[in-house]
Amino acid sequence: MPIAKHAPGPAPVRRLPRRPFAALGAAAALGAAAALGAAAAMAAIALTHGPSARAEQPAYVAMFNGVDLTGWEGQPGWWSVRDGVLFAESTAEKPCARSHYLYWKGGEPADFDLRYSFRISAEGNSGIQFRSERRPEWDTWGYQADMDGAGVYMGCLYQHERGLVAERGQKVRINESGEKAIETFADKAELLRSVRPLEWNTARIVASGPRVSIWINGVLMCEVEDHQPRLGLRKGIIALQMHQGPPMKVEYRDMKIRVDRS
């Protein structure tokens, strides 16, 4: 069966071409190395060869302070913070009759890299909305990085109107008319082995232009290239789901986001 792809590491250091510098450039670079050390030498070389081709990206920003619900907004009485963990729970005495969401108030990002840890009960069903719209009664509409305790929807990409856009182990391309081309890159049961039931797992959502990918514990779960304008939104809110149904609990922590420059 195909081997699951793992999250890429840091980009390799770009090495200078093996060719002589211009006379003045070489003198400046070597002089900097001798007098100012390696850091200054690199700065001198950069000046010689012009600005970097890639602008420096912003740093990751914490989305959750680990103390309270500052920066979040949701249906009162459901979401809480305890021991650095953001969570929601339903019980037999307090059932959740209608799914609702906790909105992040930090913006409506387009291209971003979102990283977080989650833990979900065996009966749980939840997910993170992104590039989504607010709807009445704490509802949303848009993409969701899906998760559940049973492992049926774990690592899938869902959308309210289309249902499952990509299952675990699929790369999907959607054209402007909504037609899907599906490539299976890994066995969904094998991918599920990388998820630790009832334990903490790390996850990542990367959105860049029409491309969206979901990772769990460093393993690619699914990837979508969506060109359908009305349904494949390019920016929107981020929100956490509390799902209706049997008693369940979902927990989040260590949430941070890097919003990329356009």
Image (cartoon, grey):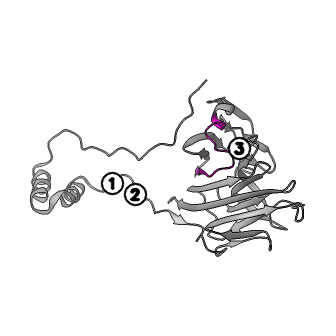
Please say if 7 is above or below 204. above
Q: Is residue 204 left or right of residue 176?
A: left
Q: Judging from the image, what secondary structure is the residue with disc 3 in?
A: loop
Look at the numbered discs 1 and 2 and tell me whether their residues touch, using CB distance below 8 Å.
yes
| Span shown in magenta | 191-206
Q: Is residue 12 left or right of residue 198?
A: left
Please say if 239 is above or below 158. below
The image quarter in which residue 244 lies: bottom right
Q: Is residue 260 magenta?
A: no
Q: In this rendering, which labeled residue sits more in front, label 1 or label 3? A: 3
Residue underneath mark 3: 154
| Amino acid type at image mark 2 | Ala
Q: Nearer the viewer, residue 45 or 188?
A: 188
Q: Is residue 86 left or right of residue 56?
A: right
| Amino acid type at image mark 1 | Ser
The image quarter in which residue 140 lies: bottom right
Residue underneath mark 2: 55
At which x and y percent is residue 211?
Answer: 60, 45
| Amino acid type at image mark 3 | Met
At which x and y percent is residue 253?
Answer: 61, 61
At which x and y percent is residue 122?
Answer: 76, 48
Please say if 151 is above or below 72. above
Dot label at residue 52: 1
Q: Judging from the image, what secondary structure is the residue with disc 2 in?
A: loop
Q: Is residue 192 left or right of residue 7?
A: right
Residue drawn where x is 36% and y is 52% of the image: 53
Q: In this rendering, which labeled residue sits more in front, label 3 or label 2? A: 3
Dot label at residue 159: none
Comes first in the chain, label 3 or label 2: 2
Residue drawn where x is 66% and y is 29% of the image: 187
At which x and y percent is residue 61?
Answer: 52, 66
- Dot 1, how many residues are within 10 Å of its Cα: few (below 14), some (14-19), or many (20+)? few
